[in-house]
Image: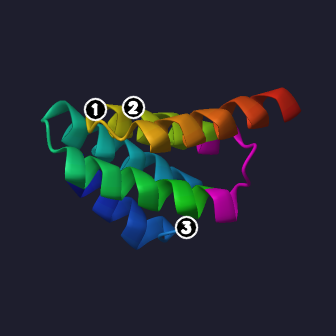
Amino acid sequence: MEEQAVKRTQILGAEHPNTLTSMNNFGGIYWTQGMMAEAAALHNKVLQKSMQILGADHPNTLISMNNLTETYQAQGRMAEVAALQEEVDKQRQLG
């Protein structure tokens, strides 16, 4: 999966939606392996880029928000979980 993300970045560029999807998936692998700090950092990076490139209400951005929320929850970062969940709910109602 890491190789796929690297190749997509090289071919499509760091801001292409497919590159962001690969990065998000790789963050999920970190999460599954219990590497929560790495997962949170990567999910946060993907979320920030998704918000800039796709917009806050885009389905892929909402998926990124959800993934970061799950990672924060696994880390016990409940205040950040609540804030992100509010944003996800707000964007889903608007969209």
User: In the rendered view of the protein, which quadrant contains the N terminus?
Assistant: top left
Q: Residues within 10 Å of mark 2 (few under 14, many from 20)?
A: some
Q: Is residue 19 visible?
A: no
Residue behind mark 2: 70
Residue behind mark 1: 74
User: In the rendered view of the protein, which quadrant contains the C terminus?
Assistant: top right
Residue 45 position in % (x across, y down): 44, 61
Answer with left or right where residue 45 lies relative to residue 38.
Answer: right
Total numbered labels = 3
- Residue type, label 1: Ala
Q: Is 78 or 40 nearer to us in this picture?
A: 78
Task: Please report the residue visible at 20 percent of the width from the left and 43 percent of the height from the top.
Answer: 30
Q: Residues within 10 Å of mark 1 (few under 14, many from 20)?
A: some
Residue 75 position in % (x across, y down): 26, 39
- Residue type, label 3: Glu
Task: Please report the residue visible at 57 percent of the width from the left and 54 percent of the height from the top.
Answer: 17
Q: Earlier in the sequence, mark 1 or mark 3?
A: 3
Q: Residue furthest front?
A: 79
Q: Are marks 2 and 1 in contact (CB under 8 Å)?
A: yes
Residue 5: assigned label: none
Task: Please report the residue visible at 67 percent of the width from the left and 63 percent of the height from the top.
Answer: 53
- Marks 2 and 3 sit apart, C-alpha to C-alpha, by 23 Å
Residue 76 shown in magenta = no
Residue 15: assigned label: 3
Describe the element under mark 3 as helix, strand or loop: loop
Q: Nearer the viewer, mark 2 or mark 3?
A: 2
* Magenta residues (range): 51-61
- Marks 1 and 3 sit apart, C-alpha to C-alpha, by 27 Å
